[in-house]
Image (cartoon, rainbow, N blue to C red):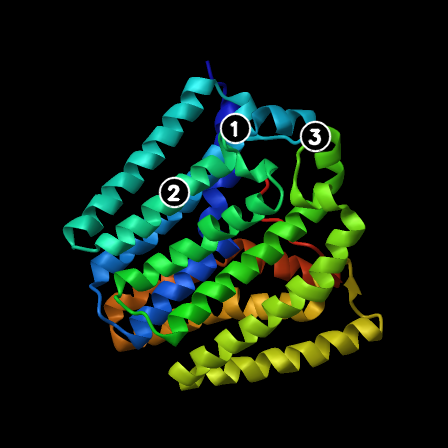
Amino acid sequence: MIGMTSIRRLVGYRGWKVWMSYDFHILLLAILYNLVTVNDFGFLDSLLLISLYGFYLMFGFLINDYFDRAVDIAAGKKRTIQELPEFMFILINCLVFSIIIVHVVHFLLLKKVLFSIILSSSIFWGFFYCAPPLRFKSRGIVGIIINGLTEKTLPVLAVFAVFDHFEIDTFLFVITSFSIHISEILTHQILDYESDLKTGINSYVRRIGIERSLTIFRTVVSPVSGILIIMLCILISLKVPSAAILLVITLLTYIVLFLMIANGRIKREEKIVPLYLSCLYILLNNVFPPFLALILSLRSPLNTAFLLVALGSQYYVAKHRYHSIKQKVLSHMEIFVDS
């Protein structure tokens, strides 16, 4: 039997928070960008596309936590799944997967075959990122590449396939999303280095060592990600000229933050991700999606639904930023914790 405590833990399970994650933000940005610049898709179908990606990301976290049960326990990580009967967690996985299948069938009926193929392949590789016998997450650099492809890159490519839009902006969106996730997964593995040593997880960072990983992150991954994000932001500003003001505001934010940190008015606890990359993440993931949704809502009152989704997806980020400003501390943000 499941007690009230377990039910409350299930409600606070981190897997439901993917709707407010950076993975969701970049996918939402790709959808809203196409709706603003291409605008060749129906309102309800667009909402279903957003819904599909939410459940897609949710399934990824459910699968990951299911197959990582023993590892998480060994590492001392508290997970809701540890308090639930196995059959119930399997049932939840099956339910979410069934919802995904219904969505994919809908897009197949719309003759979005390429989209369905790309997303289905992403689901396949994403499943075996965590699941045996392949379990790519324990295969060093291969795991990082598979994770980058399945969490952002292939889903972003699938968005453009829905809109039948394959131009230079498609390519830039795809490679930028890949570089962003490489940065994120490398950061995650660096932070998890000690627990991976303890539990024997054969991650890329564990294979090459923490010092070498930090060097690669700081000298290659971060600069490349930063350059690609800047290029993508410039492209968005060219396609949507009113978005250029956001680039200016971000530049001013850099200056203010650097001055406040230099004067000791703000303490910076994040020692891995460079400040410039953090600001660019905010611009791309937290500022542009609501802005593009606002443009759509001004075109039609019906599109206010997109604005509500975009604003709602920023809840945890806004909550963390508010506390950071209040405490005058720039700390590492971790959305995916059980509460």
At which x and y percent is residue 275? Answer: 70, 68
Q: Where does label 2 land, which residue?
A: 123
For marks 3 and 1, give the CA distance.
15 Å
The reply to whether residue 70 is in sight is yes
Q: Where does label 3 land, which residue?
A: 200
- Label 2 crowding class (10 Å Cα cut-off): few <14, some 14-19, many 20+? many
> Is residue 31 rendered to the left or right of residue 3?
left
Query: Up-down: is 262 above or below 134?
Result: below
Q: Where does label 1 land, which residue?
A: 67
Closer to the N terminus: mark 2 or mark 3?
Answer: 2
Q: Quadrant of residue 274?
A: bottom right
Q: Secondary structure at mark 1?
A: helix
Q: Secondary structure at mark 3?
A: loop
Amino acid type, callout 2: Ile
Quarter that holds the C terminus: top right
Amino acid type, callout 3: Gly
Amino acid type, callout 1: Phe
Residue drawn at (33%, 55%), measured in percent from left and top? 50
